[in-house]
Image: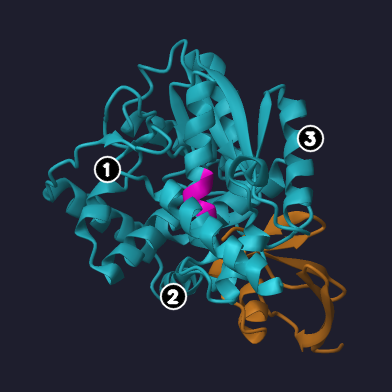
Amino acid sequence: MSNISKVKVEIVPGKLLELKIPKGYSVWDLLLELKINPEEVIVLREGIPVTEEEEVRDGDYLQVIRVASGG
Amino acid sequence: MVLCTSCGKRKAVIVVKSRGEALCKECFLRKFKDLVIKALTDARLTGGLGSKLVAVATSGGKDSSNALYVLNELKQTYGFDLIAIMVNEGIKGYRELKAKALRKLCKKLNVELIEVNLRKEVGVDIDEVALLYERGLIPFKPCTVCGVLRRYLVSLYAKELGANYVATGHNLDDEIQTFVMNLIRGDLRAIAREGIITSPGPEDVIPRFKPLYYITERESMAYFILRGLMTPHVECPYAKLSMRYKIRSLINYAEYRYPGSKYRLLKLKEEIKAKVEMPRTALRKCTICGMPSSRHICRACEMKEEISKALRELKLSKF
């Protein structure tokens, strides 16, 4: 069994990353790996927000939405 | 899987570390509404909203759309009426999308939307203001002009519409960003002035309140998504020019390293506000537009004057 998960991460709007990450990585670990402050985003799986403690699964498609929208 | 700390049954969709909560969709949506009610209560509004007209300053963004949505849910309980005002500041590629989403939301909620066009009212839009700033013809950043003129036009239209209150979409993050900006500027008067509701003023000054005062920006985005209000993500192209943009990153870093920082900053601001008594500046009427102001000529008219001068210079330079 592989110790690597393959995931797709969309940094909204428009930037799509295909990543290989260690199995057991949480959303928090993934964001830090991408140098994104978890406080500044909401992560969605199938359109529903997930907590940072959530484990990233092999084959996941995650969307990272920046929360700051205004000026 | 993290379970909801409120119901203990369902899967949590958001963790709010500073409040020690992990909430499922249902409990989060309820909590959001409760926090708006807390803001109304702390603003001492819950008893006085009956038969009043509340004008919501809307932009089509997440915060003001959420404020409109929740106030619409609460209007029957507290007996007030709602109207939405949107100032179209003319930022290409940004405003059209937001305006479209807002029109759709107002239609869904059956709330009347009053659209105000900055160019029609003032003779300039923010794209043009940005050009003037870039060329060094005016000293104000586009965000400063946008903020002042937007506020001015919302007040003007709210008054014309007979509104008793203006509700804005400012959230907890906005509030503490303003606090830190005022700290950096050393402006104690401004720190003492900012709050959940404006201090009582003369009769012709419409009080403004902030229903999302206790809600973080992150929670606001989660609510926007979970309520199905999400629209295509577009950022204001000028946002990065503002001081707020840098302060926001700084505070978010503090929250990440030291969870609870945002709530502690809000508490500190409230403590300072309670201890500092600032004599109220007497309000007079602006000699140009007649709106209440602490100066002979209000900030909006002063800006309009400078912008007109700069526009004339720009036109002359083209010949």
User: Which chain letter goes with mark 1?
Assistant: B
Q: Which residue is mark 2?
A: B250
**Between tags 1 and 3, which lies in front?**
1
Q: Are marks 3 and 2 on the same chain?
A: yes
**Residues at marks 1 and 3, common chain?**
yes
Question: Which chain is rendered orange in the image?
Answer: A
Task: Tell me the element at label 2.
Answer: helix
Query: Where residue B223 sits: x, y (%)?
Result: 63, 46
Name the residue tied to disc 1.
B294
Q: Position of residue B150 (x, y in %)?
A: 53, 45
Q: Nearer the viewer, mark 1 or mark 2?
A: 1
Residue visible at 45% across and 57% down in the picture: B173
Dot 3 corresponds to which residue? B104
Asked whether residue A34 appears in the rendered view, the answer is yes
**Quadrant location, the N terminus of chain B:** bottom right
Closer to the chain start, of discs 3 and 2, is: 3
Residue at the image point whose x is 70% and y is 52% from the top: B90
Instruction: Determine which quarter of the picture holds residue B126.
Output: bottom right
Quick check: B220 left or right of B234? left
* Category of crowding for the residue at label 2, using alpha-carbon neighbours closer than 10 angstroms: few (below 14), some (14–19), many (at least 20): few
Chain letter of disc 2? B
